[in-house]
Amino acid sequence: MFLRDLYWKSLPESVRRRAVKPLLKPFERKIALNKAFDKKRPLRFVVDITDHCNLRCKGCDAFAPLADKYCLDPATFEKDCARIAELTRGKLEFLSLLGGEPLLHEQCADFFIIARKYFKNTLLLLWTNGIILAKQSENFWKTAKETQVKLMITKYPINLNYGELEKLAKTHNVPLSYVGDRTNGMFKRPFDLAGKQDYRESFRGCKAENDCITLREGKLYVCDVIAKTPIFNKFFHQNLTITEKDCIDIYKAKSLDEILTFLYSPSPFCRYCKVKETGNGLQWAPSKKMLSEWI
């Protein structure tokens, strides 16, 4: 399941019925040909506030099992939000906080406050595996309620009482949705380490194209995998090359139109993606940190 599907499911049924055509049409595009239409659509992106995770799934496309401990500095996040708010006039389609596991960040609730400060009416989502959700402080729940954060829980085949988490969220008046079920397997996006794929065809054929736009320390990437490939490279001593053509610096971009034009264009890094082999079928299990999980 991709962000387009999860975002869609997060909306109330009445909204979906009224808005089905304008929401689905842009999600179905495989490459931006209608620039005028693109300019009308709000930017949306995800931010990984951690890289590490407490679950460490086999073949994780965020490379969490391979990652060193990393927690995004809230000050960096605020600086980037201020710049994007300047470019977008504070209008986003949605902003998602992810990881790794974002609840491992001791200042997780601070990101709610910062995001809401700059994006008053944006759908704000926190994605979690839920393992330590019940251990969060009252301040976490209070802040989540006040900033209108929606919790997005992905289910895994682990011993976790989801019913109790539902009750906890309801008690604190914080909306909660289930946005994925990994009990029957994982999704795999395998690499071509030689980088011999046609990057244009990979971009056009990618099921996640424009669903996982990622902001990472001042730069926007069309895909979360590109943003986090340095983790993969470091652990396996690989050299999947990321160039300045694979991201756009939000401080150098002169306009939102420039950013949208970039995000709707093929990225040279897509030559490493075997899109024809992408799909479900990877049985869930703890990672053994083997290269074969990602190729």
Image (spheres, grey):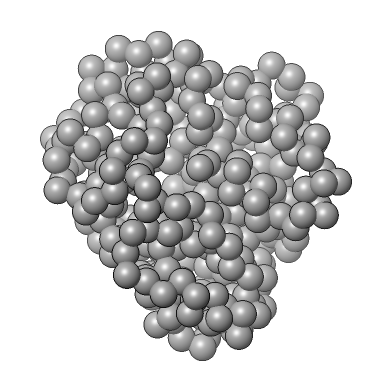
Which is nearer the eye, 66 or 110?
66
- How many labels were placed on the picture? 0
Q: Position of residue 193 (x, y in %)?
A: 23, 23
From the viewer's perspective, tell me whether residue 277 is left or right of residue 46: left
Which is nearer the eye, 248 or 224?
224
Q: Residue furthest right?
A: 18
Q: Identify the image quadrant of residue 243.
A: top left
**What's the residue at 37%, 47% (across, down)?**
184
**What's the residue at 72%, 42% (across, down)?**
42
Which is nearer the eye, 12 or 76?
12
Q: Identify the image quadrant of residue 254.
A: top right
Q: Residue furthest front?
A: 184
Q: Position of residue 242 (x, y in %)?
A: 34, 29
Q: Position of residue 164 (x, y in %)?
A: 48, 79
Compared with 150, 208 (above or below) is above
The answer to whether any part of residue 84 appears in the image is no
The answer to whether any part of residue 165 appears in the image is yes
Q: Identify the image quadrant of residue 157.
A: bottom left
From the viewer's perspective, tell me whether residue 77 is left or right of residue 40: left
Q: Residue furthest bottom?
A: 138
**What's the residue at 45%, 52% (across, down)?**
181
**What's the residue at 65%, 24% (across, down)?**
29
From the viewer's perspective, tell me whether residue 281 is left or right of residue 233: right
* Quadrant placement of the C terminus: top left
Which is nearer the eye, 159 or 20?
159
Compared with 111, 100 (above or below) is above
Compared with 12, 29 (above or below) is above
Compared with 178, 89 (above or below) is above
